[in-house]
């Protein structure tokens, strides 16, 4: 993997690479502390929850999209996640990071959605993609959308198509570590896997993904 950079294909680390002016604007804008916002929400401050939603919407959407492979489902799931978070935030006690708590809600909700779609496929007697029982299970990837005509969108489509060919357990570790940039400890808390297992899967997942993407990179 050392000879192949996947940065060309990762989407939205693009979120961190805005124009210089945008970066300056982001740096100069104070970002409220999650803890203080959460405590304000518990006291009935709806604006504080709006601030939390604005801060975490994009990362949660990217994670949901990575699991669900569908823009509309991911958008709906993200809204559902924040509704669930708002209803449950009174019980949040800061034993874990707020982001880890949000990711856990997202993971559980998306896995439930995938199970729901799998049951629908079974009832309709339609063939399923991905018979691996490990989670997360994948939905079909559509890379033929004519609106996806920009280079970045094409690269993202290629990335997610390649991701869908990995073991589901590898998919999730890659999404959490390389796309969402969670620490090994945060991923361990979220997935209940030992850090050593996470590192091992991540190494294998990166190598497998690189093998899948190498022909595409040569064509760039």
Image: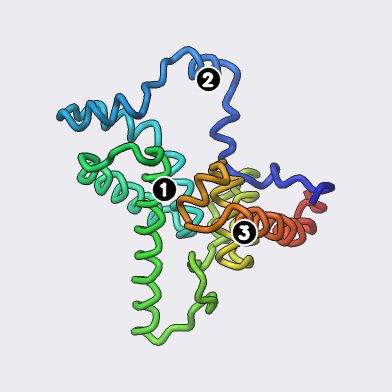
User: Position of 117 compared to 172: left or right?
Assistant: left
N-term-proximal mark, 2 vs 3: 2
Instruction: Please provide percent x and percent y for residue 177.
Output: 58, 47
Please state which of residues 79 and 72 is positioned toward the viewer in this rendering: 79
N-term-proximal mark, 3 vs 1: 1
Q: Residues under labels 2 and 1: Cα distance?
A: 26 Å
Instruction: Kindly identify which numbered label has been placed on residue 22.
Output: 2
Q: Residue under circle 1? A: 103
Q: Secondary structure at mark 1?
A: helix
Q: Residue at x 71, y 47 (%)?
A: 6
Neighbour tally class for label 2: few under 14, some 14-19, many 20 plus, Cα within 10 Å? few
Q: Residues under labels 3 and 1: Cα distance?
A: 19 Å
Q: Secondary structure at mark 2?
A: helix
Q: Residue under circle 3? A: 197
Please state which of residues 92 and 169 is positioned toward the viewer in this rendering: 92
User: Position of 3 compared to 194: left or right?
Assistant: right
User: Position of 14 compared to 8: left or right?
Assistant: left
Q: In the rendered picture of this protein, how many numbered marks are placed on residues?
A: 3
Q: Secondary structure at mark 3?
A: helix
Q: Are the residues flagged by discs 2 and 1 in contact, CB closer than 8 Å?
A: no
Q: Is residue 220 above or below residue 47?
A: below
Q: Nearer the viewer, mark 3 or mark 1?
A: 3
Neighbour tally class for label 3: few under 14, some 14-19, many 20 plus, Cα within 10 Å? few
Q: Residue at x 38, y 83 (%)?
A: 122
Q: Quadrant of residue 204?
A: bottom right
Instruction: Please provide percent x and percent y for residue 162.
Output: 65, 61
């Amino acid at each position: 993997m050392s000879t192949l950079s996947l940065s060309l294909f990762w989407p939205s680390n693009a979120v961190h690479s805005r124009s210089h002016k945008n970066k300056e604007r982001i740096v100069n804008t104070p970002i409220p502390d999650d803890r203080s916002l959460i405590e304000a929400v518990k006291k009935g401050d709806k604006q504080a929850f709006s601030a939390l939603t604005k801060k975490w919407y994009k990362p949660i959407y990217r994670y949901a999209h990575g699991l669900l492979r569908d823009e509309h489902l991911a958008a709906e799931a993200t809204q559902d996640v924040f509704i669930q978070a708002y209803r449950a935030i009174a019980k949040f006690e800061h034993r874990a990071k707020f982001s880890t708590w949000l990711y856990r809600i997202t993971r559980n909700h998306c896995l439930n959605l995938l199970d729901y779609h799998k049951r629908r496929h079974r009832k309709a007697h339609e063939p399923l993609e991905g018979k691996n029982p490990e989670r997360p299970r994948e939905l079909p990837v559509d890379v033929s959308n004519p609106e996806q005509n920009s280079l970045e969108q094409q690269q993202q489509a290629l990335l997610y198509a390649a991701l869908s060919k990995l073991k589901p357990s590898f998919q999730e570790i890659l999404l959490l570590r390389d796309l969402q940039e969670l620490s090994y400890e945060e991923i361990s808390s979220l997935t209940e896997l030992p850090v050593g297992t996470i590192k091992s899967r991540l190494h294998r997942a990166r190598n497998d993904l690189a093998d899948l993407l190498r022909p595409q990179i040569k064509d760039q």
